[in-house]
Image: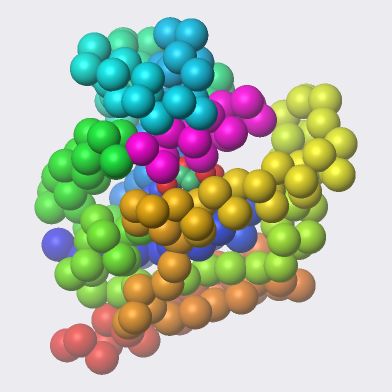
């Protein structure tokens, strides 16, 4: 199976870019952030304080059923049988995801699910630790980034488009807080794999970023043959 790992901070455009690149290549696209968001939502629904790592680990003992399905090529997330694909996208769920993702038991809980998906499919998997921890054997590793302001602006426009009531300064502050959490946590911190290709998408149009990612994937794969 061909596995492409795309890691990088929130809002670098990873998911949109990876989805389009995967469609072009005929691979499936797996958004691992959605898995952490689903666990975050489970904690919120269960009334667990996501800042309390011990409480999060204890609640995981209830073994929430986290399932991923592809409907018309789109990844949908199910939590204990309910479709939570929209509910995991709120700013509260983003923050809960960032917090629960620092808990080792949560990462261990989601690790095997991610490995299994990669074993079964040619895929582009996006996340924070795919190239470093989950798929260290991936044939292609890309670290996609952009300035915090460029990333906050994209995320802000996305949320507004979904009809959410947010303001840019809050989105930027959230983005910086999540960046800090994601890159300073003790377990699987956000950092490029040694053999990752670094791509910066600030100032690029979506089409330019997709083209850049596709040419990088093709070039890396041709080197491996
Ligand atoms: O990519 P995203 O914004 O949907 O990710 C939600 C949170 O999950 C983010 O704060 C970091 C975390 N995450 C992670 O720790 N490891 C991954 N592979 C993917 C996401």
- Residue 102 included in the magenta stretch of the image: yes
Q: How many marks?
A: 0
In this view, the residue in front, 65 or 4, is 65
Q: Please check the rendered image and state whether residue 53 is part of the magenta-colored stretch, yes or no.
A: no
Residue 50 lies left or right of residue 176; in this view the side is left
Q: Is residue 18 visible?
A: no
Of residue 121 and residue 177, the one placed in the foreground of this image is 177
What is the magenta segment's predominant secondary structure? helix
Residue 72, percent from left and from top: 39, 34
| Residue 153: % across, % down | 79, 52
The x, y position of residue 210, in whole percent, is 55, 68
Residue 83, placed above or below residue 27: above
The quarter of the displayed image where residue 156 is located: top right
Q: Who is closer to the viewer here, 16 or 79?
A: 79
Task: Answer above or below: position of 14 versus 139.
Answer: above
Residue depicted at 43% across the width and 33% down the height = 100
Q: Specify the segment rendered in magenta.
A: 89-103
Q: Residue at x 27, y 81 (%)?
A: 221
Residue 200 lies, with reference to residue 124, above or below; the image says below
Residue 201 versus residue 13 in the image, above or below: below
Residue 101 in sight? yes
Compare residues 187 and 211 and report the one nearer the observer: 187
**Which quarter of the figure is the C terminus placed in?**
bottom left
In this view, which residue lies farthest toward the bottom? 223
Quarter location, residue 48: top left
> At x 77% / y 26%, what residue is drawn?
164
Q: Residue at x 55, y 20 (%)?
A: 87
Quadrant hosting residue 23: bottom left
Image x and y of residue 118, in percent: 20, 52
The quadrant of the picture occupied by the N terminus is: bottom left
């Amino acid at each position: 199976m061909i596995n492409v790992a795309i890691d990088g901070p929130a809002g670098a455009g990873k998911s949109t870019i990876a989805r389009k690149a995967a469609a072009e290549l005929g691979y499936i696209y797996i958004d691992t952030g959605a898995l952490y968001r689903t666990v975050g939502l489970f904690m919120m629904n269960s009334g667990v304080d996501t800042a309390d790592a011990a409480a999060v680990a204890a609640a995981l003992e209830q073994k929430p059923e986290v399932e991923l399905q592809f409907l018309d090529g789109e990844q949908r997330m199910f939590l204990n049988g309910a479709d939570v694909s929209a509910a995991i996208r709120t700013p509260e769920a983003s923050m809960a995801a960032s917090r629960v993702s620092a808990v080792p038991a949560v990462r261990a809980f989601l690790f095997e699910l991610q490995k299994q998906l990669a074993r079964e499919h040619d895929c582009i998997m996006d996340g924070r630790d795919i190239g470093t921890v989950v798929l260290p054997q991936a044939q292609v590793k890309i670290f996609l980034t952009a300035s915090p302001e460029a990333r906050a602006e994209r995320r802000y426009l996305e949320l507004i488009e979904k009809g959410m009531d947010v303001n840019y300064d809050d989105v930027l502050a959230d983005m910086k807080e999540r960046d800090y959490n994601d890159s300073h946590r003790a377990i699987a911190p956000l950092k490029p794999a040694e053999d990752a290709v670094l791509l910066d998408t600030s100032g690029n149009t979506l089409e330019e970023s997709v083209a850049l990612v596709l040419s990088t994937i093709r070039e890396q794969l041709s080197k491996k043959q």
